[in-house]
Image: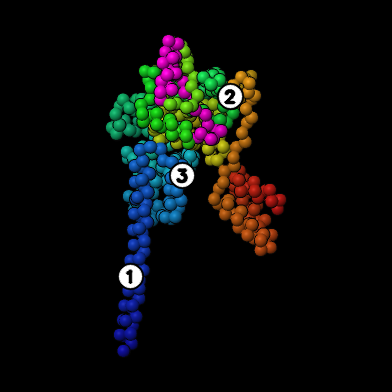
Amino acid sequence: MNPTRRRAAAIGAWLLVAFGRWSTALAIADERLDALKALHDRLLGARDAIAVDDARRALDELKKLDLRADQLEKEPRTWLHHARVAALLAAGDAGSAVEALAVLEADAGGTRETLRAAWEVAVATGDAERGVRTLDALEKAKLAPAAALEARRKRLELVGTAAPGVVVEAGDGARFDLRTRQGVVLVLDLWSTTGRPNERQLEGLRRLNAEFATDPRLRLLGINSDPPTGAAAAEALARELKVDWPQHLERSVDAPLTRGAFKIDAPPIQVLIDGDGLVRAVGLASEPEFVYAVRAAVAQAKGQHTVIRPKTVVGVVASPPAGPNGAGPVAADKPGDAAKDTPQIQPELPSIPEARDLLDRARLYLKTGKKTEAQKLLKELIEKYPHSREAKEARDMGLV
């Protein structure tokens, strides 16, 4: 074979190899995009709140897909942003969801799906100002019925306000201080015999109660607004519906909590009071965004994610209400007259994957005798992630 033919053959062989690699890369890319689309559809198509474990698996899946937004076309890029916002909300990481939403809005703002995500983030973070902006955008674009939007605006009026400074007693003798929460989140289920939850709403309450049944950071309390003459019927209905969380009967024609303090004229409705005694959300336990607000409040009470204070409709960032004599929150729920003050629960430190990686590498260096390298990594860990579980472990090692 002459040199020209040899060169042509070599070029042809190289082109075949290059084409094969290119085709394989395209096939892999197509598979990853198909997986992203399936994940996006699954998350955004959920009617009920996404389970925490499913949300965490979704975040792991997004990480494994390793897709860069700047390398994607418009549509798959939007799938990626939406999936990330939904998964973070469901996982209780509302602070990270806010950051992910900002990216989504910059790329695909104004669409029905993006406005839905913005509303869910607003509710989950207790940001009534963002909620109002989102409802205004939905109204302007005529993407939702006016009556539904007005009902949601009404809910936002309570967000960021201090819970009533009262202690109520449930039928089982347990006492609940609505304002001085001491890091324990409280969900109030406001209802009456004429404003009873439908089956879907009741199922949402049952799921919420089951999810946090063993978590000391959350309490669920029913508040019935029937007058004294309706108390017996209310107790009978609670038994009929198999409601197994504590109930407080107002037994007053004025309903001082439901209609007075919370200004709720048409129960059923749920009110979320965070661990600082601030109203964080008003909605229904059958609505995903309300469940995500509960998870975010509990995670914040445990110190697992960034602290986010509720914000009123006019943009005022709420501060924790003072306890007696101007002191901070000082009391928690008491299970009866004979109970003592509930001790404050120490917050759990969050575990951060990047910090865990540094800690694991430092330990590996120690095993191989490289103490200096290990100390450098431990110092870096403590400086970058001082409030993480891994930073505490690094300090406890006594090397830095």
Q: Residue furthest bottom?
A: 1
Is 277 or 53 nearer to us in this picture?
Answer: 53
On whether residue 219 falls in the magenta region, the answer is yes
Q: CA distance from mark 3 to mark 2?
A: 31 Å
| Lower sequence index among marks 3 and 1 | 1
Question: Residue at horizontal 56%, vertical 37%?
Answer: 302
Q: Circle 2 is placed at which residue position?
A: 335
Amino acid beneath label 2: Pro
Question: Residue at horizontal 60%, vertical 58%?
Answer: 361
Amino acid beneath label 1: Phe
Does residue 214 sit above or below 7 in this rendering? above
Pointer 1 with pointer 2, Cβ within 8 A = no
| Lower sequence index among marks 1 and 2 | 1
In the rendered structure, find residue 19 and report the number of the disc placed on it: 1
Q: Residues within 10 Å of mark 3 (few under 14, many from 20)?
A: few
Is 391 or 219 nearer to us in this picture?
Answer: 219
Q: Circle 3 is placed at which residue position?
A: 53
Q: Which residues are magenta?
A: 212-241
Q: CA distance from mark 3 to mark 1?
A: 41 Å
Question: Residue at horizontal 45%, vertical 11%?
Answer: 228
Question: Which quarter of the rendered picture does the N terminus lie within?
Answer: bottom left
Pointer 3 with pointer 1, Cβ within 8 A = no
| Lower sequence index among marks 3 and 2 | 3
Badge 1 marks a residue whose secondary structure is helix
Badge 2 marks a residue whose secondary structure is loop
Does residue 343 sit above or below 61 in this rendering? above
Image coordinates of residue 297 in percent, x first then y, are 51, 34
Left or right of 48: which side holds 301?
right
Image coordinates of residue 98 in percent, x first then y, are 45, 40
Amino acid beneath label 3: Asp
Question: Residue at horizontal 38%, vertical 44%?
Answer: 43
